[in-house]
Amino acid sequence: MSSAPPGGGWVAVTDYPAWPSPYFAELHRNVPPGFPLGFVSGLTALPVRPTRPGVVNLHRLKRLYRDRDGQRTLSAARTMLDRLRALRDGGWRIVWTVHNLLPIDGDSPRDADWYATLGVLGIADRVLTHTYADALHLARLTTAPIIVAGWGGLSATAGAGGVPESVRALLRGLRAAPCSMLAVGNITPYKGLPAVVEAFTAHTRHAHLFIAGPCRDEDLAADLVAVARGCGGRVHVHPQRVPPEHVHHLYQAADAALCPYRVDGPWEFFTGVLYPGSVGTALAFGTPVIAPHLPAIAEMTMGSPARLYPPDEGPGPAMAAAEAAHRCPRPRLRRMGDGSARWRAVTAVYRQTFEQLTCEDNPPVTTSRDNVTASPEPDTRRFTSTRPHTEKTEKKEKAAVPDLTTSSPTSGSEGRIAAALAGSYGLTVRTITRLAIGQGTVNYRADCGGGHQVFLKSYPDGTDLPAEREAIALAGLALRAGIPGAAVLPNEDGDVIDTSGPLAMSLWEWVPGQVVTRLSPAQLVAAGTTLGRIHALFADHPTPATAPAMERWRGIDVDGLAVTIDQLLDIIAERVHTGVADSFDMDAQRTLLERRALLARIPALLADLPAGLTVQLLHGDYSPVNLLFTGDELSAVLDFRPPEPFLLAYDLGRMAFYPNTVTESSDWLDAAATLIGAYQEAHPAVPDVDVRTCGRIALLQLLRSLYGVKQHYLKPGLFQDDLDAFWLIRHRAATTLLSELATTDTLLAELATA
């Protein structure tokens, strides 16, 4: 564990460790090595001027603006804000980790609460949230950068000691019940437990409900016990605190975790900002969740077993569905994941935020800010997990065939290639250069003397060679129809893929040109015209009645994507915790957290796709990296994919809204309009519905793909640095297209009817 005196470092304002907060215990237990974490119980414990770089980390505000009688008052809120301004002017940086926007004690928010909340949002240098959903809501209330730190639940700790008898008794009840539902935590009004018990009794028949946790409200405790008595012995109230180190036993034994939250009256703000710790803990132990469908909860439970109910409907139907689904005997104990991994990810973000705020080239701003009303909504908002992303200002055109290595064909792969070219193609090779392009094949340029050069693709083991032959045939069809491209060179047996030696390979005429990822207006016209010609050429080719590729594409497994993202985040968290994380780990963590939150948009986007979209043969990978330009002239279209029918709008949208186009220029919509206009002139028969929909198809493809970042952590590609950069730019393109969806829809509707 780390600790720091109050003169600097990252100082959390909390009663911990005197108050045994499970949240801060997890935070403390999982801090990165060397992170200067400390705790103080109040702002007056801090010197106005830190003795070294320091951050004041606020959490729950309510205890910081109470008068001598313990009441939250406007005068006390002013005193708190004055102290924070003085600390900030003295050199401290202010960070608020927002758990709940307002106090949740039970009474309606007062003027003092809003004054304190909006005042801190106006003073803070950074605002930390646990979910992207909370960040979206807070963006309307502050202009401070908002950092999504992620969330974690309680974890099973080693050396917890023997299980208390009270917990053993609960365990016996949970295991004996035919179907058990568990609600653990403080018994408070905002959970509405008496009403939950009534709903449970009305909607279930055989299940048992176990409620465990302390209650400070004597009237509430009495009401809950009275309601439970009328439930035929199926509701069990244990109004005592369960030691956090033993909570995992209960979650492992329960069939479902019930996590109710009210959104009426004083708790209406839960619809905007909520950190549901009980949900996080249930998910950490793999227990299915029953909870209201609130933005933060929907984000957290994505990819995990959960029944989310409309808040105004109550949990009754969800509890009934959980009971009905409980058919098979459950295992006695549920297997847990590594709960500490998420906390390591959270504390890694804390460390990165500290480093950003206290670095020498980012000094504190010493002018105070008196913001006690809602800040105007900013025009743009970027959420990060560590620091703002910066673009390189230097733009370079990438050569179509950058050299990687050049060697004489005497040994290794080059020797085998030279032997194959001599034996199967009758070519004598002088030099062979491996090219730093391509992820699916290893590519070379061979100099055969006399100015004759050829391009060679070497296919790795496991490649579907029959499909690749079909792709080569499709490219030949386009070439014969006048589409610019490279001609394949068959071997002496007439085969377009030579398999006579240890390397499967295809040989092509060398075509000069450059790959340009940011196209000029003339290049956009050339690219759009050529794509239109390709689609018009392939439009009359017969296609089967069903298109399996399209059906697979429409069946996006959102939960599976969430699980994969969590796997990648766990890997990153472990790298951070062991001190081997690099800058890409931090960028990957930020973008994966954002992407996980955006997955919730996919079902609605899919449902909005119209019927009747054109399905036909396509190029399949038409993008700037597969186009060669000589000046403004398109000299070659490369890498046709095997002829499998797919959405025409996919090819069009992918090219019109290519990530580099969307992210590297403010006029990306004009660029898309130029390309699509040229496409329509070359293919006037294209249905309007395909033009109107191509932007949404491009967006969905970006949202569903983890290409690049997935390879980085699970199976690195041939040129992984390129894939890393591609992931980051594709993610930025996805967020841009999503934020500008209405504008893009309007543009495409106008183009379709022009």
Image (cartoon, rainbow, N blue to C red):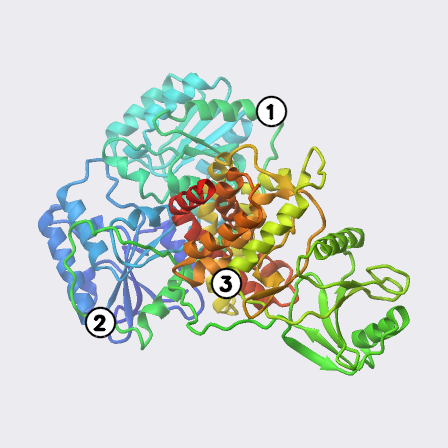
Q: Say left or right for 358 vs 76.
A: right
x and y percent of residue 403 in the render? 65, 77
Q: Secondary structure at mark 1?
A: loop
Outermost left residue: 75
CA gap between label 3 and label 1 equals 64 Å
The answer to which of marks 3 and 2 sits earlier in the sequence is 2
x and y percent of residue 27 in the render? 40, 57
CB within 8 Å, label 3 to label 1: no
Q: Residue at 24% x, 58% y: name it.
A: 41
Q: Which residue is mark 1?
A: 327
* Callout 2 crowding tier (Cα within 10 Å): few <14, some 14–19, many ≥20: many
Q: Which residue is mark 2?
A: 91
Res. 626 image quadrant: bottom right
In front: label 3 or label 2: 3
The answer to which of marks 3 and 1 sits earlier in the sequence is 1
The answer to which of marks 1 and 2 sits earlier in the sequence is 2
Number of residue marks: 3
x and y percent of residue 497 in the render? 82, 60
* Callout 1 crowding tier (Cα within 10 Å): few <14, some 14–19, many ≥20: few
Give the residue type that dot 1 points to: Arg
Q: Secondary structure at mark 3?
A: helix
Of residues 337 and 466, the one nearer the viewer is 466
* Callout 3 crowding tier (Cα within 10 Å): few <14, some 14–19, many ≥20: some
Instruction: For the C terminus, give its image quadrant.
Output: top left
Q: Is residue 565 above or below residue 728?
A: above
Of residues 250 and 469, the one nearer the viewer is 469
CA gap between label 1 and label 2 equals 61 Å
Q: Say left or right for 371 vs 224.
A: left
Q: Which residue is mark 3?
A: 522
x and y percent of residue 609 in the render? 51, 36
Q: Residue at 29% x, 49% y: name it.
A: 138
